[in-house]
Each structure stands twice: as C-alpha cells, then as structure tokens.
C-alpha cells in the first residue's frame, strides 16, 4: 500500500480527480481537505480527496457547506476550472444558467482571485513572489504570464494589495 497520502488517495480514486472524474496526472494533483485544515479539519484519508491544483486553489479554506454549494451550483455537471472537461453526475443540463455576464474576461479572473484571497484569511501569501505563484494557481490553465502579472498589478492598483519591502498586506 502506498504510504504518501497523495499516492494512497490517487490509488483509491483510480487516478481520477474527485470532482470532475477526469484522469489526473500526479504532477497536477493535490490533496483537498473536505473540511479545510485551516478550519480544523483532520489530515485523515476520510477527510481528504485528490483533485487538480486549480480546484484546490478555488476551494481553498472554504467551509464544507461552501464547497457543497460550489458543486451544487454546477447543476449536475462539474466544470473543472483547469479546462479538463466535465462529467455529468446526473442528467446533463442542456442550457446551463449564466452566473454572471462580464464585459471583460479579466474581470472574472480578477474576481476569482480576490474571492480566493478573501477566503484564505491568515493563510494569504506574504511575499510578492508567493502571491504571483498563487494567482497563477487560482486562474484557469492557459492564462499567460502577462495576464498573471496584470492581475497582480490590478490588485496593487486597486489597493486590494500593498507591497513594502517585498512584504504583502491586504485590504480586501
């Protein structure tokens, strides 16, 4: 039996993402705590699943109730934010409802980043380098380095984030 939690969970889940049921390369896999460890959840296998890093970053330290709501909002068809596809849990919805119409796709990514940083609370990145890599993990795959930098710059220009001596503080 594999000894590392990620190896055990990958084996139990058949190498598939817990949420979208798509094949999950180990390099893209991360352990998601259903009851977030930041909220006191245990590291036991019964509280952990393997999913892609994008889903883990999205769910962050949400409560179990909030995580259920994210899954339920998918109306039976979980859409992975990394673009890996979706899997119908029940009958697929023919015309999925639009949650929000945005004029600029960057607005949606910016909102996603801000919401994730708010949920992180005291677990927010504390250096500019860590913030940049966190933003890269939050936004969907296929986003360019220039877009990551633009999102970080927008956090700075809107005053949501301040940097002094490479230390990051937040006003979310």
Image: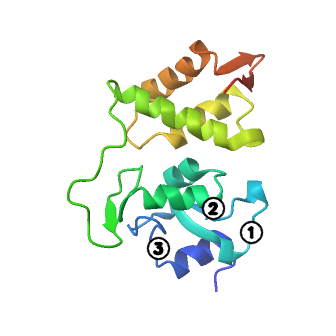
For the residues labelled 1 and 2, say whether their Cβ atoms are less than 8 Å apart: no
Which sits in the foreground, 15 or 89? Answer: 89
Q: Is residue 68 above or below residue 151?
A: below
Residue bearing mark 2? 64
Distance of label 1 from label 3 (alpha carbons): 20 Å
User: Which one is closest to the eye, mark 2 or mark 3?
Assistant: 2
User: Which one is closest to the eye, mark 1 or mark 2?
Assistant: 2
Instruction: Find residue 13 and report its horizontal and vertical position in percent.
Output: 50, 77
- Disc sitting over residue 43 in the figure: 1
Instruction: Find residue 45 and report its horizontal and vertical position in percent.
Output: 67, 76
For residue 6, which quarter of the picture? bottom right
Residue bearing mark 3? 15
Q: Is 92 left, or right, of 129 in this rendering? A: left
For disc 3, the neighbor class at 10 Å (few under 14, some 14 to 19, many from 20) is some
Instruction: Find residue 47 and report its horizontal and vertical position in percent.
Output: 67, 72
Please tell me which of labels 1 and 2 falls first in the chain: 1
Q: Residue at x 58, y 75 (%)?
A: 9
Q: Is residue 29 visible?
A: no
SS type, badge 1:
loop
Q: Is 89 left, or right, of 165 in this rendering? A: left
């Amino acid at each position: 039996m594999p000894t590392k939690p990620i190896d055990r969970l990958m084996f139990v889940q058949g190498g598939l993402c817990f949420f979208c049921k798509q094949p999950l390369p180990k390099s893209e896999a991360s352990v998601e705590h259903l009851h977030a460890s930041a909220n006191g959840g245990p590291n036991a296998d019964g509280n952990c699943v393997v999913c892609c890093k994008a889903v883990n970053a999205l769910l962050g330290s949400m409560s179990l109730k909030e995580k259920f709501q994210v899954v339920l909002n998918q109306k039976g068809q979980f859409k992975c934010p990394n673009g890996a596809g979706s899997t119908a849990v029940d009958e697929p919805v023919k015309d999925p409802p639009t949650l929000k119409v945005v004029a600029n796709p960057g607005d949606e990514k910016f909102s996603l980043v801000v919401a994730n940083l708010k949920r992180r609370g005291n677990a927010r990145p504390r250096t500019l380098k860590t913030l940049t890599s966190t933003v890269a993990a939050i936004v969907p795959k296929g986003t360019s380095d220039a877009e990551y930098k633009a999102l970080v710059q927008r956090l700075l220009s809107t005053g949501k984030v301040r940097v002094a001596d490479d230390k990051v503080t937040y006003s979310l």
